[in-house]
Amino acid sequence: MKKSKKSQKGVTSKDKNKGMGKEKEREKKSSSLESGSYNYKMFSFFNRKFKINEVEPPSDVNKAFSLFTDDGSTHMTAEQLRRFMSVHQCEVSTRLEDAQNIIEQVVNRRHHITKFARHTLNIEDFFYFLLSDDLNGPIRTQVHHDMSAPLSHYFIYTGHNSYLTGNQLSSDCSEVPIIKALQNGVRVIELDLWPSKDEILVLHGRTLTTPVSFIQCLTSIKEYAFVSSPYPVIITLEDHLTPELQAKAADMITQTFETMLYYPESDLTEFPSPESLKYRIMISTKPPKEYLEVRSKDASEDESSPKDDSDVSESDQEDEDFKSLQAGVSGYKRLITIHAGKPKGSLKTALKEVTDQVRRLSLSEHQLEKLAGSHGLDIVRFTQRNILRVYPKGTRFTSSNYKPTIGWMHGAQMVAFNMQGYGKSLWLMHGMFRANGGCGYVIKPDILTRSADELFDPKATFLPVQKTLKVKIYMGDGWRLDFKHTHFDAYSPPDFYTKIYIVGVPADEAKKKTKIIEDDWCPVWDEEFSFPLTVPELALLRIEVREYDISEKDDFGGQTCLPVPELRTGFRSVPLHDKKGVKHKNVRLLMRFEFV
């Protein structure tokens, strides 16, 4: 096996990833890129030279170029490019002006020629265009879903404990992760409010997390709420405040957000639409009515009790204090647009209860899994009018996340995630909310909003295949530009392979893997895979590139996740991201998508 070179060298992860002092500095100098080849230093004694392979168009690209240029021409005109995009790429709305603009951009980038000098593409230009994700990406980058339906008809990008910088027990609380979340398109920010004398602090209660002030969080939300999306931001409050501080919180909220704040005059019987709430901020929390009911009862009892004259002045003052407190708390309650709270009875009863007012119910991931086993249809029915929020179980101290698909399958709008909990689950969340231009709202498929007589059953088996997704992965490129030449292997070029997953309803879940391409910074796989899908509306395509290592864990080479309903057919440039979801500058795959 050719890979035996790695066992031969006896390299460990320390050798690959840690410095070797002056010796490594000497290696760096001797292993620099020279005239079309890479030099790798072996045991400080001799060099191994590897030729840099030229990146060439796959045969399918050459065929498409020939087919749409007619008569074997060496150049593609704007009209021919328009026809290629309309027919092969299924972008039927492409105009001649769009094609001309693409040609101008490609020629300018590759040849630094002004738009007046050249109006056609040669095969290398055409290949460059196909590999440019900003010109030929895998999904649309504009908002294109119907945004006029009620909020309950959308999946909403939702954060959990949005103020935490790290783990759930001892990390700092800060406005920084709130800002980052809003910049990345998150639309639901969660704040835990705790009293500190006369101040309101945001922190994870009963832990060692250091607090941040409530007003600082509100100010940051106001400043960054709409930098990435014009659609509404929802602040969910976990409120541990006294009535006096609730009144103070209401003043802070109204003074900070002013006209940006949305709240209805009366309880909602249907949620408004994202379109009608553009550039608005809403509050969702449990109304403080229980406290007022108790105080009202106490006051009525006091009124029926006999008083002597000496108690009158003191009693009057208490009444005035209570009225003032009641007004303050009522003002706090008035600001709550999406009412939350625990049900009076069991969760099962709450799901079936029919009321005039719409509301929000929160379940832990464990509660959802348990209820889904026996009351899946009731959850789907509940989420057609009301909002369901799912949050991580309390034992996820490291800020890890759960698999979000079970929530989405049941129509849960707010699948709350720790945005600092990097990993495969968060990659799926990123993938879902790349849809609809990344605006933070993705309309739920019809199967989750249609009439009660046709409720989607998430537990249903033996569903018919609706369509088959064909995925062809041609090649990858860009690692040599974004990484040092010894990043993956100290002694030779990398050995890349790609894993492809379908994540969705259980019947659709699948994974495939390409062959390993050895010693090549620009791997060519040229492999096709088919994925039959029973519920394509809820499917995600997860892609991960790894670098093979015979003796250690395979190195990570990049990942992305894409919503299947949003995939654009034809040849597409698919950019890859790092483990935190940050897009690499140059690393991308050339792929082709087709639905049959």
Image: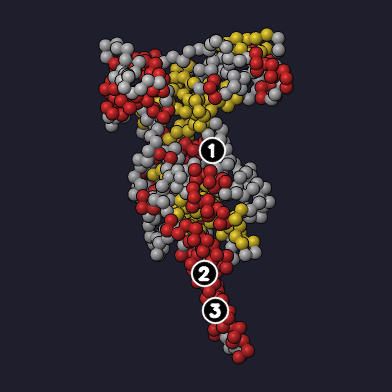
Mark number for residue 425?
Answer: 1
In the shown orientation, is residue 122 left or right of residue 311?
Answer: left
Percent position of residue 360, x then y? 47, 55
Q: Secondary structure at mark 1?
A: helix
Residue at image coords 41%, 23%? 109
In which quadrant is the C terminus drawn? top left
In the shown orientation, is residue 33 left or right of residue 102?
Answer: right
- Name the N-terminal-most of marks 2 and 1: 2
Percent position of residue 355, x then y? 41, 61
Depth order, front residue of 308/407: 308
In the shown orientation, is residue 254 left or right of residue 8?
Answer: left
Depth order, front residue of 317/517: 317
- Name the N-terminal-most of marks 3 and 2: 3
Q: Which residue is mark 3?
A: 320
Mark number for residue 321?
Answer: none
Mark number for residue 328?
Answer: 2
Is residue 486 visible from the viewing direction of this image? yes
Crowd tier of the residue under label 3, counting other residues whose Cα lies within 10 Å: few below 14, some 14–19, many 20 or above: few
Q: Quadrant of residue 51?
A: top right
Residue type, mark 2 in image: Gly
Crowd tier of the residue under label 2, counting other residues whose Cα lies within 10 Å: few below 14, some 14–19, many 20 or above: many
Residue type, mark 1 in image: Ser
Depth order, front residue of 214/343: 214
Percent position of residue 494, x then y? 57, 18
Residue type, mark 3 in image: Glu
